[in-house]
Amino acid sequence: MKTPGDTGFAFPDWAYKPESSPGSRQIQLWHFILELLRKEEYQEVIAWQGDYGEFVIKDPDEVARLWGARKCKPQMNYDKLSRALRYYYNKRILHKTKGKRFTYKFNFNKLVLVNYPFIDMGSGRGVPQSAPPVPTGGSHFRFPPSTPSDVLSPSEDLRSPGVFSTVARRMARGSVSDCSDGTSTNSELEEGVGVEDRGGADRAFRGLLHPRLSHDSLFRAYGGPGGLGRPPPAHRVHADPLSPFPVSPLPGPGGLLGPTLSPALSMTPGSHLPYTPSPSLSPMLGSHFSFNPEDMKRYLQAHHQSVYNYHLSPRAFFHYPNIVVPQPHRPSAAPEKPPAALHHAPLMPHSHSLHHHQGDEQQHPSPFKFKLQPPPLGRKQRDGSASSTGGSSSSMGSSYAASGLLSNSLSCPPKIKVEPISDMESEEEVEVTDISEEDELPDDEGDVFASPYPANGSAPPTVANGALGAIAEDDLDEDVFKTPAAPPMGPLTLTLLGLKSEPPPPISPGGTLCIPLKQRFKRRWSEDQKMEADGEREDAEDKKVRAEKDEAEPAAREPGNVDGLRKSPCLGQGGPPAQRRASSELQRATAQLSLENHGTC
DNA sequence: GACGGAAAGA
DNA sequence: TCTTTCCGTC
């Protein structure tokens, strides 16, 4: 795989800036968490786990200690730290992964989209080098050249996360203790950086690229919740358990986006599969908000895809209607993608995790198996609280300064008002149900693995309602999205957001237009199954007959005769199995398209 | 362990 | 505004 420096970026600068959180002048806990997460040396303390921003605090005491050191709060402990983390629940920055101790999950959609809403992803030219000014007057927002070779001024280079070689080392630094003396100290983090420096870029980019990416681990297709449920770690051959992004928006099997997706995500499509680096801290030492526009664009595009699969805030897109979801890359557009990969290429970002226990599902072009993981229900919404046992809590040990990437930034990141989320509109209330095969999707933690057509409590599971339900989670403005939507497949996903109009939904095969989605899917599935079964059976029979025939008339078999005809591309359905199969495939594809274009009843 | 209210500090 | 601290509850 490529080295971190080849592509990708750290988590957006703003993620590390105190300014990113109005009112805060100090590093915020989630910043700190991200900071630790990107440090390889803290793998044993805290690490990405599961998918899409999920991380586990392996050593609560230590994390608390580090946090306490960072904040000069010697009395800090996990109990207090966790309280702080819990405050993020309402802010949707974080949510708890139920059933897993010390496991939380970042809602990067909230963190990213809300901060990059102004990007015109529809622009073929990418993000303008000079980004629109952000609401916050004093912020210095700009898009640096796409590549290091584009030359950044020395000062810029120091600030730009887009320059990897520099960033790799730099990002690991920037630890300024918030302690009263205001001095920068060599914290453990700082020390860790040194190690990273010595260890090379790969290590230094632990945060940029998932640490485990260094050993061929892969992220599940970012936008591909593509049904990428959460594979057990043991199956995560390619899915980086550390990655907050379950699936990669990268090209590759089913890949939809370009190689480098994001400044926030280091995308390093490997020779084998696409990678989705974990979002991590960018070497934000200054106040500049810089990143590669192309990367950002791709990232957001990918993120857009995730709307269907995760708690994204579609509202953000409505604020910026120009956002356009890219068409799946063609071979020519994605040279890095092995032609073979296209074969499976679903329109949605696809999982690379071929060994995933849900591999079959992932390979299936069907977009119906997405995992939607609504944040944990608030206490009020919860029927009951799940209690767990064990765990630890402790008081701080010795205090020492921990490093921090965030320091004195002057700029403010673009901000979009995050409207209060009522109990009812909350993504938490969106119970997403996998209408396809729930039983196939283990839910080891209460997360919901679902298709993009959740059984919205307030609406029947029609394509529109279902899809909307899926994206209605989070702080979505429901009204805006109450438009007919097509299944989240590639370009059609835009429909869900109402960003792109689609022609009237064609009548699906079998006239199932107004049949509940679930039913239609089942019907289609049955048809497909039947079709395949018939095809195989006929094929087998055909072979058998042929064999018998060959035995009986060995001399009659002349080149160009039977086989010649068999290979004829002009044969219709009545042709040989190969043709029938092709026809079947064609029909299936047609059905697929039909479904895709289905808005609603 | 996890949650969240409350009060207080920065 | 964001914790920090404390605490009762599940």
Image: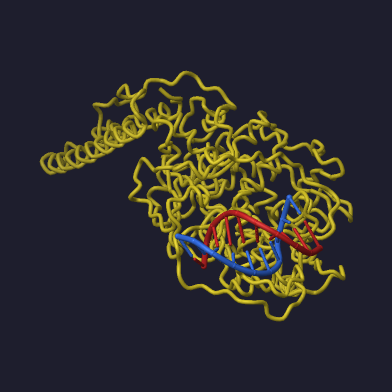
Chain colours: A yellow, B red, C blue
For the point 64% across and 64% down, the residue is A37
Q: Is residue A50 left or right of residue A64?
A: left
User: Residue A376 location, x and y as percent?
Assistant: 51, 51
The image quarter in which residue A435 lies = top left
Badge count: 0
- Quadrant (top left, top right, bottom left, bottom right) of the N terminus of chain A: bottom right
Residue that extends furthest to the bottom in the rendered view of this protein = A398
**Foreground of the two, A137 or A300:** A137
User: Residue A493 location, x and y as percent?
Assistant: 53, 33
User: Residue A519 location, x and y as percent?
Assistant: 31, 32
- In this picture, is A404 found above or below A13? below
The image quarter in which residue A211 lies = bottom right
- Quadrant (top left, top right, bottom left, bottom right) of the C terminus of chain A: top left
Would residue A132 be seen by someone viewing this image from the given angle?
A: yes
- In this picture, is A19 found above or below A45? above
For the point 43% across and 32% down, the residue is A458
**Foreground of the two, A458 or C5:** C5
- In this picture, is A34 found above or below A12? below
**Foreground of the two, A370 or A489:** A370
